[in-house]
Image (tube, rainbow, N blue to C red):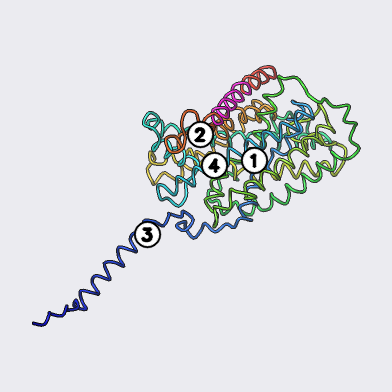
Amino acid sequence: MEKAKPTAPPIRDVDTYSSKVELAYNGSREDLDPYVPADHRPLESNTSSFGALAHLLKASLGSGVLAMPLAFRNAGWLVGSIGTVLIGFICGHVIHILVKTSQQLCIEIKRPCLGYADTCEIVFQNGPKPVRKFAKFARELADWALALTHMGACCVYVVVIAESFRQISNQYGGPSWSVNIFCALTLVVLVPLTQITKLKYLVPFSALANFVWLGSIMISIYYCLRDPPSISERSIANSITGIPNFISTCLFAMEGIGVVMPVENEMIKPQQFLGCPGVLNIAMTTVVALYGFVGFSGYLKYGEEARGSLTLNLPQDEILAQVAKILVACVMMLSFALIYYVPFDVVWRKVQDKIPARGHRVAIAGIRLAGTLLIVGIACAIPRLELFMELVGAVCLSILGLLLPAVTETIWRWGKDLGPCNWIVFKNALLSIFSLVAMVSGVAYSIIAMLENL
């Protein structure tokens, strides 16, 4: 009896079986493929690595570069030079761990990008159970520290504008008013500027400010290098009581952490932000080199007379020096509205849901006006430029630029690849202690100086 020949399965069943295998394979392949945040970012996120570097340099090379001679005055030229490198390294490292934490978090929760406050909040939400209840507080702390930092910068801008025009007025026979009156007069320009609500309308002002700013820095450096005194006439190291003020001024000048996440979030290839050489390393190396050079040359030239803005030390009887002062004042006027946008945005996000939609336009105008009056009022009350820089650097940037990133990285990695005895825990603990010491000592010395000048 012949054996029955095996029959082939129907073609339809074979096709069905193949389809199931292919579907299973594709599904498993999708599960194995990692989530790449850059692939899911909106089309508007089209900044190249070179563009990101330009943005980061522009944000870091602001008014702070002209304050570095003041920082060196507090520390001495040798301590200031070494301290600038150390603080630059610390700032660069802290930015690195913040961006790395944010990038890893985006992959895990499958989000294309995260801001600073978002990163802090979500890290706390997904951290060990004891810290989860602090997630909302971490977000609020990041938001308000960022807002106060930019408000402090706006106060600095008002004082520089007022002092520059006061010097020019005194030189050319204008009214000999106090700097307080000139601070109040800035409202004539600043009130209309701060009513501009769309960032795109501020772009021409920002572009013009970049060119003007470069010219004023070049003129200031020219005067620093013209007939400098002997280095033996300057202190190698000053009193230890000046170190907190040096650290606070350096943090104010150098720390651009508020713009780091927006820049990284707009990059086409965010993986090129970190690494070697990487956008961050190139930017921080350039910033530290320029800040150290300006600080050293400015202190060598003007010594204990160094002011909160280098242009305020320039000669009052030379046209070129007066041009530099006018350029700096104009730059800060043009930049004020852009810097002011950050604290307004934080405040508006907190109150907009409590205001009826029909009243939003009036409320926006009112909040912008009130904020401008508050900033100018503070500048009028305490028109000491260096005190603002030291206080803002001590409080806001110690929290925003040092403490929060260190704490956030520790919570994010805790239980994954960190334990109580890991060296990263000790490193972040040292960063946290350094930030708290810098904050307390900087605030104490700033308040003492303010009381002495009332």
CA–CA distance in space, label 1 to label 2: 28 Å
**Which residue does the numbered mark 3 point to in the structure image?**
30
Type of secondary structure dominating the magenta stretch: helix
Split into 4 quadrants, where in the image is the C terminus? Answer: top right
* Magenta-highlighted residues: 427-442
**Which residue does the numbered mark 2 point to in the structure image?**
144
**Which residue does the numbered mark 1 point to in the structure image?**
188
Which is nearer the eye, 59 or 100? 100
CA–CA distance in space, label 1 to label 4: 21 Å
**Mark 1–mark 4 contact, CB under 8 Å?**
no
CA–CA distance in space, label 3 to label 2: 40 Å
**Which residue does the numbered mark 4 point to in the structure image?**
342
Q: Quadrant of residue 396?
A: top right
Q: Which structural element holds mark 1?
A: helix
- Residue neighbourhood size for the residue with mark 4, other residues' Cα within 10 Å, grouped as few (<14), some (14–19), many (≥20): some
Question: Is tag 1's residue or tag 4's residue first in the polypeptide sequence?
Answer: 1
Foreground mark, 1 or 4, reads 4
